[in-house]
Amino acid sequence: MSLKFNLILMLLVLFACQNRQAQQVTWAASSHWLNENAELEDSLNLEEFMRRSFYLSSAIRWNEFGNCIRVKRQEYLAPRQYEQLELNDSLWQVLKLLLQDSMVFKTNQTGPQNDEEFALYCGFQYSLSWKDACGEEKSVVYIPPYANESLLQLHSLFLSLLDYQAKPLSTQLDTLQLDSEVYGLVKSLSPAPRIQSTIRFVPPELFPENE
């Protein structure tokens, strides 16, 4: 009797989760690096450390109420613009459908899967995190040349939203919290290359030509 009751309860929970909207979706384009102060991360002021080691180019955050906040810059190092997107229900449904594809959150989408894959890429790395109505969190860090088709569909959707009609944000946004969340995600899933203040140059050996 107890086993039957537990099974029914579990099915009810699963059904409820599938019929509720995702709680939060965050997509971001960013870059981060390690410098000579990387070892001081725990002692530096968070705002100062983020200023030295992290750059957020754009971000889109969606919650279960349909509120969508967009962060973007007109060009590199330009001031951020914070805007409110008003999106229809059909677009929200498309987003949820794409997020449910298990291939989206497949690991290792920042580099080649085998020796035959190689791409020259100069651009931002992207991160996507999804917290559903049942509290389950999924996340991925990727760059477009190595992202799978399922993830590229979502990537195209978010890129289109960067040019979507918007209005100025009416509420205060905790930008430091947003930066630190995105930084924590990309740092854990895609460690940054270390930037050194000095570079050692080793000259090549020259040999006389044989006569």
Image: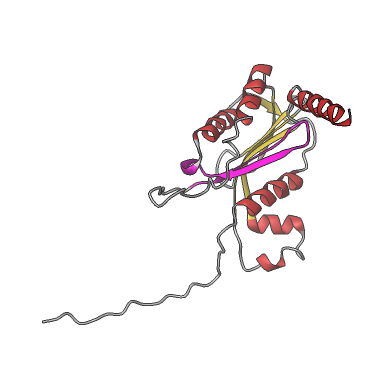
Q: Residue at (49%, 33%) from the top-left corner? A: 149
- Horizontal side of 45 relative to 38 (left or right) equals right
Residue 79 vs residue 18, the one in the foreground: 18
Q: Which residues are magenta?
A: 123-146
Residue 178: x %, y % from top left: 72, 44
Residue 208: x %, y % from top left: 20, 82
Rendered position, 185 above or below 158:
below
Name, please, the residue furthest toward the front: 1
Rendered position, 84 above or below 205:
above
Total numbered labels: 0
Q: Residue at (87%, 27%) from the top-left corner? A: 5
- Horizontal side of 131 relative to 200 (left or right) equals right
Residue 204: x %, y % from top left: 33, 76
Is residue 145 covered in magenta?
yes
Q: Residue at (57%, 31%) from the top-left corner? A: 154
Residue 181 vs residue 103, the one in the foreground: 103
